Image: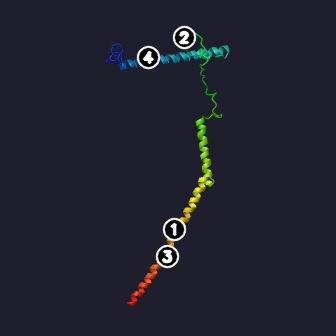
Amino acid sequence: MPKGGKKGGHKGRMRTYTSPEEIDAQMKAEKERKKREEEEEASNDNLVEEKLQGSGSEDSDDEGSAKRKGVEGLIEIENPNRVAQKAKKVTDIELEGPRQLSRREREEIERQQAKERYMKMHLAGKTDQAKADLARLAIIRKQREEAARKKEEEKKAKEAAAAAGAARGVNSLSLK
């Protein structure tokens, strides 16, 4: 049986639920706080720009301008395993340069090119499968030609038999 027995909760206390009005108030307070922080950052950025332009130096610390959490601001700690993420500017990104393809993309392109090469060879009749298909088609054509010839011969034979039968029928009528 879990702690607290059947009732649940923590150490016998009753559960408390936040009302929708309280949630709305908290959300509004959070939005206002974010808005104030953005305004402060904008004003700080303007002050930093004015200082940089006034002094003529272009040294800027990415670490100094970023907010630090907890004790980080008080103690300088450098973790050799931590990779600092550098923000890339839109002007620095090279869109025109050759992009490195991933292994899957490279394999997919190679697969498509191999398929296209095979289809060209197949249409030209140079692959083993194409040769086998053409041989099979030639055999089928011969069989169909022979079947058509036999059918034509049978049709002519029936016509000849019918003509001969009609001639006999005329002869038999006259004898009676």
Amino acid type of the residue tagged 2 in the rendering: Val
**In this image, 14 relative to 146: left or right?**
left
Instruction: Indicate which disc, 2 or 1, sits on the residue closer to the N terminus.
Output: 2
Q: Are marks 4 and 1 in contact (CB under 8 Å)?
A: no
Mark 3–mark 4 distance (CA, rounded to whole Å): 102 Å
Secondary structure beneath dot 2 equals: helix
Amino acid type of the residue tagged 4 in the rendering: Ala
The correct choice, above or below, for 172 with respect to 42 in the image is: below
Amino acid type of the residue tagged 1 in the rendering: Ala
Relative to the observer, which residue lies in front, 162 or 39? 162
Quarter of the image with the C terminus is: bottom left
- Residue where numbered disc 4 is placed: 29
Mark 4–mark 1 distance (CA, rounded to whole Å): 91 Å
**In this image, 105 relative to 9: left or right?**
right
Q: How is the image coloured?
A: rainbow
Within 10 angstroms of label 4, few (less than 14), some, or many (20 or more) residues?
A: few
- Residue where numbered disc 2 is placed: 71
Q: Are marks 3 and 2 in contact (CB under 8 Å)?
A: no
- Residue where numbered disc 1 is placed: 147
Instruction: Indicate which disc, 3 or 4, sits on the residue closer to the N terminus.
Output: 4
- Residue where numbered disc 3 is placed: 156
Instruction: Indicate which disc, 2 or 4, sits on the residue closer to the N terminus.
Output: 4
| Residue reaching furthest to the bottom | 175
Within 10 angstroms of label 1, few (less than 14), some, or many (20 or more) residues?
A: few
Secondary structure beneath dot 1 equals: helix
